[in-house]
C-alpha cells in the first residue's frame, strides 16, 4: 500500500482503537443479540431482471471533495429504493469520505433494500458495528487484507449473518480472493493508490472469474452505454455512487441508467 490508501488505513486503525474505548466489543456483542435477521444481499442482485445496480450514498471523496451540497442520506436512499436500485451501499468512513455509521442506521430505518456497509474493514469490531447499525453485507478490500485476514473476516462476517462483497483491483489478488471462498466479487475500476479510474479494468479481469461468481463492477460507471457494455460482457451488478449523487435529479438518473426512461 502507498499514498492515499496507506494514509486511510493508518487512520482507520486509530479510529477502531478509539471506537473500542467508547463502546467495548462485549457491549456490541450484546446489542446485536436482538438484531433482526439480515436481508439476502446477493439474492437481491441476482434476482434483478437485468443489470442490478447497487446505488451508493456518498457525500464526498478524497479525489473529488464534496459531491453534493444538500446531502441528505435518508432522502437519497429513499430515492434509490423508489427508482429501481437492487441494493444500497452506504459509505461510513468519516475522515476521507465524510460518511458516518449513523447514516447506515438511519437508512436501515427508512428503506427495505439490502444495505452494504462500505468502509475500510480491518477488524471484527467493524463487523459488529455493521451488524448493529443494520448492514446486511460489508465490503472487504483485498488490497488491505492479507492472506490470513481476508478469509478470517469472511468467516467472521458469515458467523454474524453478514455477506461480504470482496473487492480487488490488482489481478494478482484474484486467486487469493477465490481461495478465501469469496464468490461475491467486486472489481474496482479505481486504483485506490492513485484514485485513477478506468472502466475497462473490469473487462480485463472478467475472463478469470469462475462461473459461479457474482461479479460487481465498481467506479467509473456513468452512462446507460457503460451499463450495457458491462452487462454484455457478463457483469451481474454495478456499484455506482458519484454519478447519482452529483445528478440534479437522482431518480431520473437512476432510471436512465436502468433503461427505464
Image: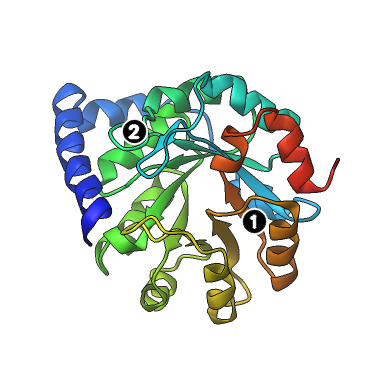
Q: Quadrant of residue 97?
A: top left
In the picture, measured across the screen, residue 194 lies left or right of residue 245, that is left
- Taking depth in this image into account, of 228 and 62 the one nearest to the observer is 62
What residue sits 25% from the left and 66% below the top? Answer: 146
Dot 1: what SS? strand
- Return the residue at label 1: 237
Q: Nearer the viewer, residue 7 or 91?
A: 7
Residue 243, placed above or below residue 28 = below
The crowd level at tag 2 (other Cα within 10 Å; few <14, some 14-19, many 20+) is: many
Residue 129 circle label: 2
Q: Residues within 10 Å of mark 1 (few under 14, many from 20)?
A: many
Q: Residue 104, percent across and down? A: 46, 28
Q: CA distance from mark 1 to mark 2?
A: 26 Å
For the point 28% across and 33% down, the residue is 95
- In this rendering, the count of numbered labels is 2
Please identify the quadrant where the C terminus is shown.
top right
Please name whichever residue, 122 or 170, is drawn nearer the observer in this view of the structure: 170
Amino acid at each position: 500500500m502507498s499514498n492515499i490508501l496507506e494514509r486511510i488505513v493508518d487512520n482507520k486503525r486509530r479510529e477502531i482503537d478509539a471506537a473500542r474505548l467508547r463502546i467495548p466489543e462485549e457491549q456490541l456483542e450484546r446489542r446485536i443479540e436482538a438484531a433482526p435477521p439480515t436481508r439476502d444481499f446477493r439474492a437481491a442482485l441476482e434476482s434483478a431482471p437485468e443489470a442490478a445496480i447497487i446505488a451508493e450514498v456518498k457525500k464526498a471523496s478524497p479525489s473529488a471533495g464534496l459531491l453534493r451540497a444538500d446531502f441528505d442520506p435518508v432522502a437519497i436512499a429513499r430515492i434509490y429504493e423508489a427508482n429501481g436500485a437492487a441494493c444500497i451501499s452506504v459509505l461510513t468512513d468519516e475522515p476521507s469520505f465524510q460518511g458516518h455509521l449513523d447514516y447506515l442506521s438511519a437508512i436501515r430505518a427508512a428503506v427495505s433494500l439490502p444495505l452494504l456497509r462500505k468502509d475500510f474493514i480491518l477488524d471484527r469490531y467493524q463487523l459488529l458495528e455493521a451488524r448493529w447499525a443494520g448492514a446486511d453485507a460489508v465490503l472487504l478490500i483485498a488490497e488491505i487484507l492479507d492472506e490470513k485476514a481476508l478469509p478470517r473476516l469472511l468467516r467472521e462476517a458469515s458467523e454474524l449473518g453478514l455477506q461480504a462483497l470482496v473487492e480487488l483491483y490488482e489481478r494478482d489478488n484474484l486467486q487469493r480472493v477465490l481461495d478465501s471462498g469469496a464468490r461475491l466479487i467486486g472489481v474496482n475500476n479505481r486504483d485506490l493508490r492513485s484514485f485513477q479510474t478506468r472502466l475497462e479494468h473490469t473487462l480485463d479481469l472478467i475472463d478469470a472469474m469462475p462461473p459461479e461468481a457474482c461479479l460487481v463492477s465498481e467506479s467509473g460507471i456513468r452512462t446507460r452505454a457503460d451499463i450495457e457494455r458491462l452487462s454484455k460482457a457478463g457483469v451481474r451488478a454495478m456499484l455506482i455512487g458519484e454519478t447519482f449523487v452529483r445528478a440534479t435529479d437522482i431518480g431520473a438518473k437512476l432510471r436512465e441508467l436502468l433503461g427505464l426512461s
